[in-house]
Amino acid sequence: AGKAPPQVNLQAPCKTTSPASAAMRSSHARALMRALRRASSTPRIMSLLPSATEIVGGLGLEGHLVGVSHECDVAPTADRLRAVLEAGCERVTTSDIDPHALPQGEIDRRVKAALKEGGDGALYGVDAAAVARAAPTVLLTQTLCGVCAP
């Protein structure tokens, strides 16, 4: 087992176009670039956060993506993400909560139930074998949003 990759924990705001949101994305981009400088000479980026995947693509680094979450849909475009996935980037998470198939109220109920059940309150499954195959040198994550899922 090798050294764990540097983890960049990004606390992203809900999707918005406010000036504060733009400033936060810029701050996240700077944090990502610092992590990449600390990583190996050829970074292998795993993004478990859709907004971070967009930042990776916006910086022109989508070719370094080796793993993304089931929710990532653009990097920086849907077509470009499809190309990255076809080139071997893996989807490494799963969820029983499908935001495209469930009404908002049901999603809210399931999130709150998962948090109340005890244990780790996990909302997502992580495919450990896919993570191991991808061998990331940089891991982009975030904590559960206190606004969206109090």
Image (spheres, rainbow, N blue to C red):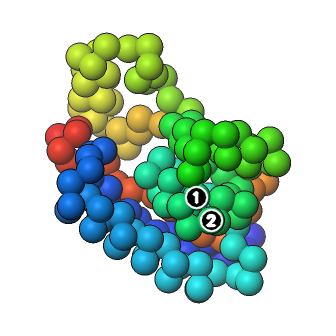
**Secondary element at image label 1:** helix
Residue appearing at x 36%, y 70% in the figure: 26
Residue 81, percent from left and from top = 66, 45
Q: Amino acid at mark 2?
A: Gly
**Within-10-Å neighbours for mark 1: few <14, some 14–19, many 20+:** many
Residue appearing at x 75%, y 77% in the figure: 42
**Residue 106 in view in this figure:** yes
**Secondary element at image label 2:** loop
**Within-10-Å neighbours for mark 2: few <14, some 14–19, many 20+:** few
Residue 137, percent from left and from top = 66, 71
Instruction: Tally the marks.
Output: 2
Q: Amino acid at mark 1?
A: Gly
Is residue 24 placed above or below 97 in the rendered structure?
below
**Residue 125 in view in this figure:** no
Any mark on residue 60, and which? 2
Residue appearing at x 69%, y 73% in the figure: 43
Residue sitting nearer the eye, 56 or 95: 56
Any mark on residue 103, and which? none
Any mark on residue 57, and which? 1
Quarter the N terminus occupies: bottom right
Is residue 5 placed above or below 53 in the rendered structure?
below
Quarter the C terminus occupies: top left
User: Left of 28 or right of it: where is 81?
Assistant: right
> Is disc 2 in contact with disc 1, using a CB cutoff of under 8 Å?
yes
Is residue 11 placed above or below 99 in the rendered structure?
below
